[in-house]
Image (tube, helix red, strand yellow):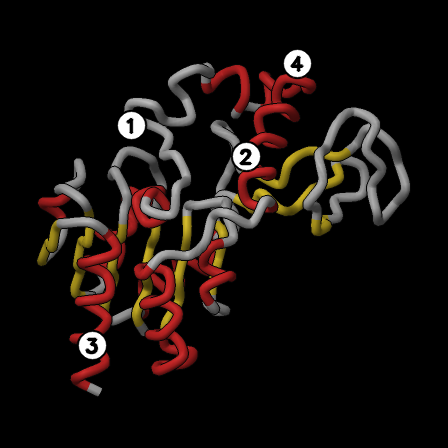
Amino acid sequence: MIVILTGAGISRESGIATFRDAGGLWENERIEDVATPGGFARNPGKVFAFYNARRREITAGSIKPNAAHLALARLEQACGESVLVVTQNVDNLHEQAGSRSLLHMHGELLKARCTACGKVSAWEEDMDEKSLCPACGKIGKLRPHIVWFEEMPLYMDTIDEALTTCRLFVSIGTSGNVYPAAGFAARARSSGAQTLELNLEPSLNASGFHEGRYGPATQVVPAWVAEILEKR
């Protein structure tokens, strides 16, 4: 199995701002205010507005998958169930590109979670304190289906099993800043997998990979996929 971790760098070239770059999503907002349970409890309106704006970027239809997303979908189509994409991104660009073997460990922007019934529902409209849960009908119980700081990422058991059984782990467009994802390469490597970093520049944990290839995702990812497919 090939396990591929994707981060903000793969979506940057589609026009989605990253978190930490100059001009990124956090430049005008404090993480504590818009991406923590405490921030949501203090000012839900501010949090709703932040994610509503991001959701509108996706639903407007102007942001499309780029060559890197399309290459990964092509790899999955050629290799079937032996490819798993684990993404830190909350956009739907992998799905738009055609990826199906996919886990959103940090949640999904186009979904809502009900704090009353626990149901996760598709959601493309704005959300606020008066929004109605499609499942249980309660008002004011919805929140963005996003994993905030201080919360546990999703699918960790499934991801860990994949990391310990894969033959190749590839990290694409990640900073190496955020755990537990920053520890995936070490986990896979300790189980005998080869590890490869594809990134604009070396990440903070680049030394933990067997190999690194650097440049724009739309260049290095399709080139790597082409190499894999040529060997099949």
What residue is shown at x 71% (from left), y 34% (from top)?
126
What residue is shown at x 71% (from left), y 40% (from top)?
125
Disc 3 marks which residue? 228
The residue lying toward the viewer, choosing from 115 and 29, is 29
The label number, if any, that marks residue 21 in the structure image = 1
Q: Please say if the residues under marks 1 and 3 sit with CB atoms less than 8 Å apart.
A: no
Distance (Cα) linking label 3 and label 2: 34 Å
Distance (Cα) linking label 3 and label 4: 48 Å
Q: Is residue 126 left or right of residue 13?
A: right
Q: Work out whether mark 3 precedes mark 2 in sequence or the reverse, and give the earlier one.
A: 2
Distance (Cα) linking label 4 and label 1: 25 Å
Q: Secondary structure at mark 4?
A: loop
Residue 33 placement (x, y as % from top left): 53, 15
Q: Amino acid at mark 3?
A: Ile
Q: Around disc 4, counting alpha carbons within 10 Å, would you say few (fewer than 14), some (14 to 19), or many (20 or more)? A: few
Q: Amino acid at mark 2?
A: Arg
The residue lying toward the viewer, choosing from 128 and 177, is 128
Distance (Cα) linking label 2 and label 4: 18 Å
Q: Amino acid at mark 4?
A: Asn
Q: Around disc 1, counting alpha carbons within 10 Å, would you say few (fewer than 14), some (14 to 19), or many (20 or more)? A: few
Q: Work out whether mark 2 precedes mark 1 in sequence or the reverse, and give the earlier one.
A: 1
Mark 4 against mark 1, which lies toward the viewer? 1
Disc 2 marks which residue? 54
